[in-house]
Image (cartoon, helix red, strand yellow):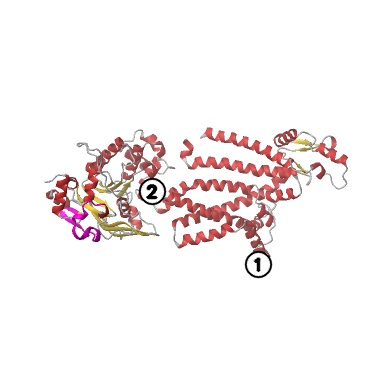
Amino acid sequence: MSEKFAEVKQADVLLSVTNLSVDFTTDDGVVAAVHNLSYTVKRGQTLAIVGESGSGKSVSSMALMGLITSANSKVTGEVVFDGQDLMSSTSEEVRKLRGNRIAMIFQDPLSALHPFYTIGYQLIEAIQVHQELSADDARARAVSMLNRVGIPSVEQRMDEYPHQLSGGMRQRVMIAMALVNDPELLIADEPTTALDVTVQAQILELLKDLQQEFGTAIILITHDLGVVADMADDVVVMYGGSAVEYADVMDLFYSPQMPYTWGLLASVPQITEHRERLDPIPGNPPSLINLPSGCVFAPRCAFKDLVPDSRCESERPQLLEVADGHLLRCHLDDQQRMFIRQDRNIGIID
Amino acid sequence: MFPYIVRRILLMLAMLTLLSIVTFLLFNAVPTDPARLTCGKSCTPAIIAANRIRLGMDQPLYIQYLEWMKGIFVGRTYGSGTAAFQCHVPCLGYSFRNGEEVTTMILQALPVTIYLAIGAFVLWMGVGISTGIYAAKHRGQWQDRTIMGITLVGYSLPVFFVGLLMLIFLIVRLNLFPYPSYVSPTYNILQFLQTMILPWISLSILYAAYYTRLTRSQMLETMSNDYIRTARAKGLPEKVVLRRHALRAGLTPIVTSAGLDLAGLLGGAVITEYIFSLPGLGRLSISAVTEYDLPTITATTLVAATFVIVANLAVDILYAAIDPRVRLS
């Protein structure tokens, strides 16, 4: 496994995010939506960001797209895309990347498409904002892209409105619109959450095909570990605005190290075993206002008593490398984690 | 789309019919005797009786209504013999008070009101929508707060107050403008503009304040939609996002409001016309009311209400033009 990681590490880095933080000042206090998040995305590969609602996974990617602009927000950190520092670029420079070299698709394709404009109009608009193409050429490009994502009778669909299409078709339109300028990076924010299960699988297949064909790197934001296993190369697990575990997808599923990740894995139904009920993680995600000084997950963690001096409640753990390329934010030591995993049969014990 | 419009037009005709009946009954239920009013000083019961027949008021109410309707569509004849005279299509009635056909009086007053209403409408929509967009763009910042403060003041200023202030200070005291004396724009465009500019401004202040607030709140609401995030994620310049994506989506309530407000004003901007001595529909109605000129009151009410009903139809058709979801369902 360490060999594989070393090989990946040498692969070309497309995007590197370092200590990205996003704060919102509200009347109730400062909301630390994202705190010191770091990750890298390699060309043509998929990084999954996993976490519950409110863990900061969507906000972090909106921030790197330069889409967090409200007066009460503060975005800090370093975001380097293909050698260009996005945080020190002007908003105009970042705008020229958006929808062009970095594209984005969203959870609910009905609300994400403008209800008053035709499919064709919205695609052509996306093309012409970044490419000097005549109306006819842009239309031809839109038609071929819609064909590519598997929309039937495209010429007719071009003149239809989003509400005339099914959910799966709309998400295909969103994907076509995102890929229409050949982006190097696609941020997919819960692309299948709002879709039927059968359609979900089709959309994921389509994304994988397109990734192969165009060599697009993908940041996949999801709470669905099934999707992660299917798509991802690397995984960041986020909790309460911070990365709590960051590993190669194999490492994460075979040797998960963080109690929160264990909880996520235990709450996925398994077809191979019989369980009366799923094991949800007790408690609720933390409020991001005035986060506790200790580990953010401590209030919900079943193992915090194993750590002496209640350090889980008093001291925020650092994100440290516990194995090759496997980063973890947890006070439990190696033996404790190994013992718990053996005891509870978590992952594959080697 | 086409059947929808036809259906709406039929509905509108039904409403207009109902409206004419109600208006007619309302003003004929007033406890005054038009025959007595048209009689003059030396009045004998015989003259009153003769007048009543001449006006057709000896007939049952439904006959009178049908006569009135007939007058509008084919014209009618008042009186008989040598005293008879023809009232031409569309005959909205005859004002014995002024000795004139009501239609003629309305046609004289209408252009004044239309110029006043349209001018003010253009002014307040232009100012209101652009300021509203600007405020929404700077939400929570000092620009937004300043604009919201000013609109609150503007919104609380009654038209008669602003109008009178302008009249007193700008015209009487400072002599910045000549005394208002309405002329047709085709006769003397400069004098027309000099007369109209203050009425336009005083009428639009309140509306501009209202439309600024309406546009701002609509923009803020649509800006939080997912498709606005998509538009930004596509890399569209912020200007395009605001105008093409956000404003269009927030336009429907603005269009509704604007259509009805304009229609309301076309029925006569009573106070403004009065203050600035503009001989429009509003002034016509007021003087008709004070003079118990029933045919004129009935006719101006009918005209004003027709504007509102037609505006309603126009707004509904515009809806369909703006929102394809309305069109297709």
Quarter of the image where one finds residue A225: top left
Whether residue A329 is visible, yes or no, is no
Distance from disc 2 to disc 1, alpha carbons, whole Å, reads 52 Å
Between residues B194 and A57, which one lies in front from this camera angle? A57
Q: Which residues are magenta?
A: A300-327
Whether residue A264 is visible, yes or no, is yes
Between residues B211 and A251, which one lies in front from this camera angle? A251
Task: Find disc 2 in the rendering and name its residue.
Answer: B231
Quarter of the image where one finds residue A155: top left
Q: Position of residue A113 (x, y in %)?
A: 39, 43
Please report contact status of discs 2 and 1: CB closer than 8 Å, yes or no: no
Pointer 2 chain: B
A319 in the magenta segment: yes
Mark 1 surroundings: few (<14), some (14-19) or many (≥20) residues within 10 A: few
Residue B226 badge: none
Relative side of B7 to A149, left or right: right
Residue lying at 60% horizontally and 57% vertically, measured from the top left? B201
Pointer 1 chain: B
Q: Which amino acid is tagged 1?
A: Leu
Task: Find disc 1 in the rendering and name its residue.
Answer: B174
Toward the bottom, the furthest residue is B174
